[in-house]
């Protein structure tokens, strides 16, 4: 009896072929990304870097956008690895690992010590093609950690990184690494909270206790005022929720937090028990949103209203949160513009500057924000990425 169903071996061959094809596509993508960066093309759309353009216009995460840019830079110095990547033998993840070995600082150190980058390229390519990703990471780590007896100790910040990724339900995942000293400091701070909070019958795992300790550590810093002041205000946890939901709502996504995550009405009420509740009403009997011409600077009420309405920088392709932003007059004060919500837009510092150099933002009647370049053309982001035919 014949069957058209693929065998196990055929399926695995298909998987391997698709992985190789994905590697080749990733390799092709790095070239125009690097070319656009060298040409400073993102400036045309008011973005400061290729990574920020990829985040805003192609909907890549911050980590993925940065990795793509770093890979393009690294492959310029690693031609053998680039060739293997083109052939589908090396993944974008492996290139990202190898990129740590050819940062500007590492290249300068190699030149000072008379090391041949071509030899490094050959070694890394051989391990990447024949070994596992973990093998490549160990080789890169050994190379980066090799002591420079002819120079100063390396800067510990070179070995520190942290990437935060918000998940669909608003929860946060993160990954990173610390140098030995930084790691010791983190462990000492976390362990203090872990050991101070061990109630009888505690059934939490070690990982859960460390997670709770990290949150408690953040709570302590925010509560004691130990964090740097941002835009004239001490950073705090912020939640925006309708009054009805706060009083008796049951909606699972009633509250919006400062960094964009949504929480339930019940969780918002829980936070409000220990927080300060600020009432903002969009209407004539609430906060004075329309201040006319007698005041140039936006008041605290107007700033809060703009934050509630805009949720962050309104410049197309930008995702800067509210605490990076200031209230900008759409029609400048000097040109007769009023200090009112209708004449206000929330813009980050980068794009606040851009609108003073020819870019223009406008809020449409339907509430959508649009952005124009100095030449009058509109900056747009795709409604949906079109799949390949």
Image: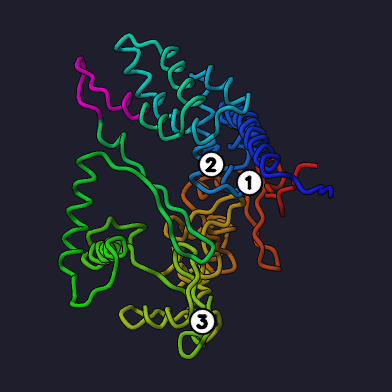
Q: Secondary structure at mark 2?
A: helix
Residue at image location 35% in from the left, 24% down from the top: 105
* Cα distance in 3D space between marks 2 and 3: 35 Å
Packing grade of label 1 (10 A; few <14, some 14-19, many >=20) is some
- In the foreground, 235 or 281: 235
Quarter of the image where the C terminus is located = top right
Q: Position of residue 1 (x, y in %)?
A: 84, 50
Residue at numbered disc 3: 242
What mark, if any, has residue 65 been given in the picture?
2
The span picked out in magenta is: 140-154
What mark, if any, has residue 58 been given in the picture?
1
Q: Secondary structure at mark 3?
A: loop
- In the foreground, 336 or 267: 267
Q: Are marks 2 and 1 in contact (CB under 8 Å)?
A: yes
Residue at image location 41% in from the left, 83% down from the top: 269
- Tell whether position 142 is magenta: yes
User: 299 left or right of 374?
Assistant: left
- On the question of residue 64 being in view, the answer is yes
Q: Position of residue 31 (x, y in %)?
A: 61, 27
Packing grade of label 2 (10 A; few <14, some 14-19, many >=20) is many
Q: Quadrant of residue 208?
A: bottom left
């Amino acid at each position: 009896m014949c069957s058209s169903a693929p065998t196990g071996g055929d399926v695995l061959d298909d998987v391997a072929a698709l992985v190789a094809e994905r590697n080749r596509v990733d390799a092709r993508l790095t070239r125009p990304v690097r070319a656009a960066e060298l040409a400073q093309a993102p400036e045309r759309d008011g973005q400061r870097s290729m990574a920020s353009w990829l985040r805003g216009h192609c909907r890549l995460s911050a980590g993925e956008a940065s990795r793509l840019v770093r890979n393009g830079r690294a492959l310029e110095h690693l031609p053998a690895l680039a060739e293997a990547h083109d052939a589908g033998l090396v993944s974008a993840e492996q290139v990202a690992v190898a990129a740590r070995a050819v940062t500007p600082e590492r290249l300068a150190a190699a030149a000072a010590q008379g090391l041949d980058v071509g030899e490094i390229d050959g070694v890394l390519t051989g391990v990447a093609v024949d070994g596992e990703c973990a093998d490549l990471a160990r080789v890169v780590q050994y190379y980066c950690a090799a002591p420079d007896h002819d120079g100063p100790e390396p800067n510990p910040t070179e070995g520190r990184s942290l990437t935060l990724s918000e998940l669909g339900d608003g929860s946060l995942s993160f990954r990173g690494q610390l140098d030995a000293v930084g790691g010791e400091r983190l462990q000492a701070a976390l362990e203090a909270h872990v050991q101070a909070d061990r109630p009888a019958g505690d059934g939490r795992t070690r990982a859960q206790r460390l997670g709770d300790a990290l949150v408690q550590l953040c709570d302590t810093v925010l509560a004691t005022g130990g964090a740097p002041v941002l835009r004239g205000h001490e950073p705090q946890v912020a939640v925006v929720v309708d009054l009805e939901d706060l009083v008796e709502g049951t909606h699972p996504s009633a509250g919006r937090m400062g960094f964009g995550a949504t929480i339930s009405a019940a969780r918002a009420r829980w936070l409000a028990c220990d927080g300060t509740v600020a009432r903002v009403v969009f209407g004539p009997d609430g906060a004075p949103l329309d201040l006319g011409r007698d005041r140039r600077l936006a008041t605290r009420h107007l700033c809060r209203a703009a934050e509630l309405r805009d949720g962050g920088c309104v410049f197309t392709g930008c995702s800067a949160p509210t605490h990076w932003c200031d209230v900008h007059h759409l029609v400048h004060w000097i040109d007769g513009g009023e200090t009112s919500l209708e004449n206000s837009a929330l813009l980050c510092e980068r794009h606040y500057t851009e609108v003073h150099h020819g870019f223009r933002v406008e809020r449409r009647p339907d509430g959508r924000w649009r952005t124009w370049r100095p030449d009058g053309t509109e900056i747009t982001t795709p409604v949906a990425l079109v799949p390949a035919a």
